[in-house]
Amino acid sequence: LKENKDWLLPYAAFCVLRDKYKTPNFNNWKTHKRYVAGKIATMFDAKHKDYSAVMMHAWVQYQLHLQLTEAIDYAHNLGISLKGDLPIGIYRYSVEAWAEPELFGMDFQAGAPPDQFSDLGQNWEFPTYNWEVMKADGYNWWKKRFAVLERYFDAMRIDHILGFFRIWRMPIDATQGVLGYFYPAIPVTREELHANHIDFNEDRFCKPFINDSIIHHTFGEEADVVKAHFFELNSNGLYKFKPEFDTQRKLSDSFKKQSWDWKEEKLLSLAANVLFIIETTQDGDNVYHPRFNMEKTLSFANLPEWERVKLAEIYNDYFFVRQDDLWYEKAMEKLPALLTSTKMLICGEDLGLVPDSVPVVMDQLAITALKVQRMPSENIPFYDPKNASYMNVVTASSHDSSTLRQWWHEDREMTQQYFNQQLKQYGTAPWDLLPDFSEMIMKQHLYTDAMLAIFPIQEFLATDHRLMNENMDDERINVPAIFPHYWRYRMHLKLEDLKTETAFNQKISDWVKDSGRK
């Protein structure tokens, strides 16, 4: 308790209050809705009625520390290094948000723009960070996280390192990532729009554009029923959602209470039929961020051609030109201060829509980058691991992706191209990924210049038909576009049984030694 009081006292108290009020949402607690250190400290007085409960939670944390330390020591004695993980976000109703709410943007949600995981983007629903507040004390909150991880790990993977450059931020009333925008970012202003001869009208550009044609196109024969239930007609002949349905959050909540024949996704799509997202600055002024994939919206399609051309130019400038210097500056404010606080090797998960400043910063700060073969940052179908330089981590799959065996079935045209070009095989690709080809993929990653080659255990098992799971879909770890958390993978083999697989284990051992990764 004495050595870990900064985090352990609030954590143990949080657990007791969470269990007492049967919810982690501290806004709904009868007492201690706001964290006050002095009041929490009294719970650790032996005479306090909650003393036994808080001490039990502290004791459990101590036992976990002992167990993890024992496992770490065991691995280190075998000459094995261990890499931990630093999640980019926190849960909205966590002890961190309760104890230090000033560090977080509780009125916003973080996520990701549309990508290979989701056409609608991702909404992780955790709050954003108040970086200016964190900067004021030298990012002490982050340094304390690093220090705890350093007790156990030799290397650390920073999840979504792009979040240190900028985060994808959504208003709290959105449910889909597509209604987000980069923060910080240089926004679009009314002056810029007017300079491009665009007669900017906030209602037309920032609210869902819905007319009779769009409703009938979306709902067909059910259009009149939908209009009557969800919409009001404006004086200009356009429709707007009724007040009880005028955000994605309200729509989603309404579908939890009542089911209709038409699909929720169609209404959510209409709620996202906007061209710009509004950001209100600290000065109270409105600035604007182009909606991702603006040109694919029905709102965009209903503009005259000259206006579409002008907006496309602004869109491309916003996403691909104007932000890079700002994001470089923001990353170099934070990351050097954090990296100098630890001896761990730092690996950055740099997948997604990667701005040009990211590899520059990572090279300058000697942060190893992640190369997932099927998620290349370049405009190529797949990444060839032989091109990886030393400051890289190569892998065939990640915890957020499908396994190799699943990926083999996702796009048969891509699979065929991969089979012929990357694996250098003739003819038609087999229907299933065979163990021999799994082994070939593993070796192509191991025998490279990359500092590290790390794989999910499922990919090792895929090299042996006796050990792979018969149901490949049971091997998926996470689908990042699904909230709440999807993590549910359990290995179908017992470790005790896997240890007896002498030939399999020797095969893996030989790969590691022969590739110089011992």
Image (spheres, grey):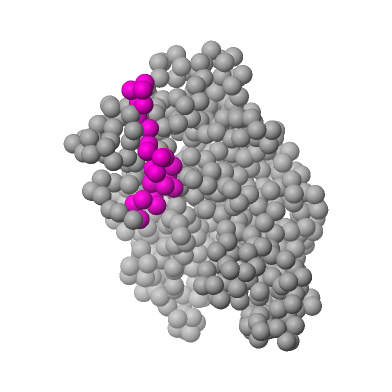
Q: Quadrant of the C terminus?
A: bottom right
Q: Is residue 138 left or right of residue 253?
A: right
What x and y, as percent, mark residue 439?
Answer: 45, 62
Looking at the image, residue 274 lies above or below residue 247? above
Q: Residue at x 65, y 33 (%)?
A: 284
Q: Is residue 116 visible?
A: no
Q: Quadrant of residue 229?
A: top left
Q: Is residue 58 left or right of residue 124?
A: right
**Residue 326 sits inside the magenta stretch:** no
What x and y, as percent, mark residue 451?
Answer: 65, 57
Q: Residue at x 60, y 51 (%)?
A: 106
What x and y, as percent, mark residue 210?
Answer: 35, 29
Looking at the image, residue 125 lies above or below residue 179? below
Q: Is residue 98 visible?
A: yes
Looking at the image, residue 283 lies above or below residue 495? above
What x and y, as percent, mark residue 86?
Answer: 64, 60
Q: Residue at x 41, y 15 (%)?
A: 305
Q: Quadrant of the N terminus?
A: bottom right
Q: Is residue 160 left or right of residue 373?
A: right
**Residue at the front extreme, as displayed:** 30
**Residue 252 sits inside the magenta stretch:** yes
Looking at the image, residue 408 lies above or below residue 486? above
Q: Nearer the viewer, residue 67 or 452?
A: 67
Q: Which residues are magenta?
A: 234-256
**Residue at the left extreme, as displayed:** 221
Q: Nearer the viewer, residue 69 or 15?
A: 15
Q: Residue at x 47, y 55 (%)?
A: 480
Q: Quadrant of residue 120?
A: top left
